């Protein structure tokens, strides 16, 4: 059997839909659907991410059992840096001393360069370049 990632769905506060639309637009993703408080975005590999209105008011805690974070791949270190600048310009705090290289996640001659941040709904995101060290 062969399978692939189809989609991921996040429950969010409807007032935060614009944050995700702008963020994923900046990252080059297409809007697949927008309406009734639902936003769907698609990348280049047929996978999609959906943001739908939350039905409970509880807080998301990414250190508890469940999804820790979503990572979006970058094509270069400079793309990661550009995302960090974009996020700072939106008043989004960058987490865990990022952007930075993570040698503990790298193979010899390669790098793992990331920026980590939290969305207004406390969803942890990573934008990461993995590949040859420039």
Image (tube, rainbow, N blue to C red):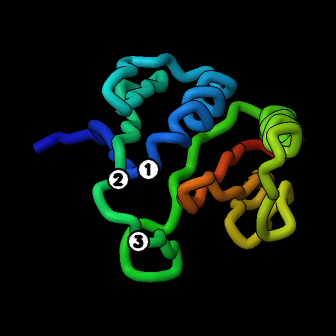
Mark 1–mark 2 CB contact (< 8 Å) = yes
Q: Is residue 48 left or right of residue 116?
A: left
* Residue 53's disc number: none
Q: How many C-alpha atoms fall within 10 Å of the one at disc 1: few (<14), some, or many (≥20)?
A: many
Residue 58, which numbered label?
A: 3
Q: Quadrant of residue 22?
A: top right
Across and down, in percent, residue 5 comes to 30, 41
| Disc 2, SS | loop
Asked whether 87 or 132 is in front, the reply is: 87
In the image, residue 39 sits, relative to residue 85, either above or below, namely above
**Image quarter of the N terminus:** top left
Label 2–label 3 contact, CB within 8 A:
no
Residue 77 in view in this figure? no
Q: Earlier in the sequence, mark 1 or mark 2?
A: 1
**Residue designated by label 1:** 12
- Circle 3 — which element? loop
Indicate whether 46 appears above or below 102.
above
Residue where numbered disc 2 is placed: 54
Q: Earlier in the sequence, mark 3 or mark 1?
A: 1
Write the residue at 55% across / 42% down.
16
Q: Which residue is pictured at 37% across the width and 72% down the height?
A: 66
Locate the C terminus and report the quarter of the image it occupies.
top right
């Amino acid at each position: 059997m062969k399978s692939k990632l189809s989609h991921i769905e996040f429950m969010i506060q409807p007032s935060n839909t614009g944050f995700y639309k702008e963020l994923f637009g900046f990252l080059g993703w297409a809007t697949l659907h927008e309406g009734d408080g639902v936003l769907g975005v698609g990348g280049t590999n047929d996978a999609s991410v959906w943001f739908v209105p939350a039905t409970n008011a509880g807080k998301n805690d990414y250190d508890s059992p469940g999804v820790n974070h979503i990572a979006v791949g970058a094509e270069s270190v400079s793309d990661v840096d550009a995302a960090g600048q974009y996020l700072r310009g939106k008043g989004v705090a960058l987490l865990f001393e990022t952007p930075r290289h993570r040698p503990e996640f790298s193979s010899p001659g390669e790098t793992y360069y990331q920026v980590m941040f939290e969305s207004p709904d406390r969803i942890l995101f990573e934008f990461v370049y993995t590949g040859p060290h420039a």
